[in-house]
Image: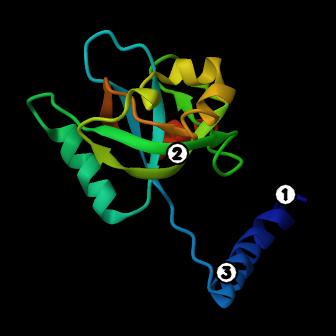
Amino acid sequence: MQCTMRRLLPALSLCALLAGCASGVTTVTPTYFLIAERFPNVRDSYLLPLTKPDDIARARFIMSNIDGFGQIAVARIARGSSDGFTDNRDLLHGGRRWSWHVSEFLGFGDATIELIDGTPSQVEADLDYWLGPSMGRIGFWNYTVSREVRPAELWPSR
């Protein structure tokens, strides 16, 4: 059975690719960044998927800024995982999984309104609140792009 599956997998992958091309649907693999506190008392972190080249370049610039100043990532969030297999998690504390994910990146900014300031742990503790009054948006004041996340960190079992 395994041998048959190994032979079928490339053919099935090709069929899926051709079906996507025929329907005009293209999928973009996100580049993930770790968003963490910019000060020494690092409490937690979350994953920020970016797909637009300008956003990826900006995130890389922010994390390479040697004076330690970074910009706030502003995003919309939603329940669950983003794609069914890439869970949002705190890579700073053993990979604990969050029950929410970034559903849309809105941009980088110098400041946000107080209503969307917090921490990933606060969002986890009261997700209904964060999806309500803040309209599903986050923009944590003390958090910024910490580093780019390697694919092996996203899917450690692969």
Q: What whole-number distance in Å separates the C-alpha atoms at marks 2 and 3?
A: 27 Å
Q: Nearer the viewer, residue 10 or 41?
A: 41
Amino acid at pointer 2: Arg
Which of the 4 image quadrants contains residue 146? top left
Secondary structure under the numbered disc 2 in the rendered image: strand
Question: Mark 3 = which residue?
Answer: 20
Query: In terms of sequence position, does the residue under pointer 1 or pointer 2 come before the other?
Result: 1
Q: Is residue 112 above or below residue 94?
A: below
Secondary structure under the numbered disc 3 in the rendered image: helix
Question: Which numbered mark, 2 or 3, is in the foreground of this view?
Answer: 2
Question: Mark 2 = which residue?
Answer: 76
Instruction: Tell me, yes or no, whether the two marked residues, 1 and 2, touch with CB atoms within 8 Å.
Output: no
Q: Position of residue 34 (x, y in %)?
A: 40, 35
Q: Position of residue 73 (x, y in %)?
A: 36, 40
Q: What whole-number distance in Å separates the C-alpha atoms at marks 1 and 2?
A: 42 Å
For the point 67% across and 42% down, the residue is: 81
For the point 45% across and 31% down, the residue is: 116
Residue farthest toward the right in the current orientation of the protein? 1
Query: Is 140 displayed left or right of 65 in the figure?
Result: right
Please give the label number shown on residue 2: 1
Query: Is 70 displayed left or right of 19 in the figure?
Result: left
Please give the label number shown on residue 83: none
Question: Which numbered mark, 1 or 2, is in the foreground of this view?
Answer: 2
Q: Nearer the viewer, residue 88 or 77?
A: 77
**Does the image show residue 95?**
no
Amino acid at pointer 3: Gly
Q: Nearer the viewer, residue 153 or 115?
A: 115
Query: In terms of sequence position, does the residue under pointer 3 or pointer 1 come before the other?
Result: 1
Q: Is residue 34 above or below residue 21?
A: above
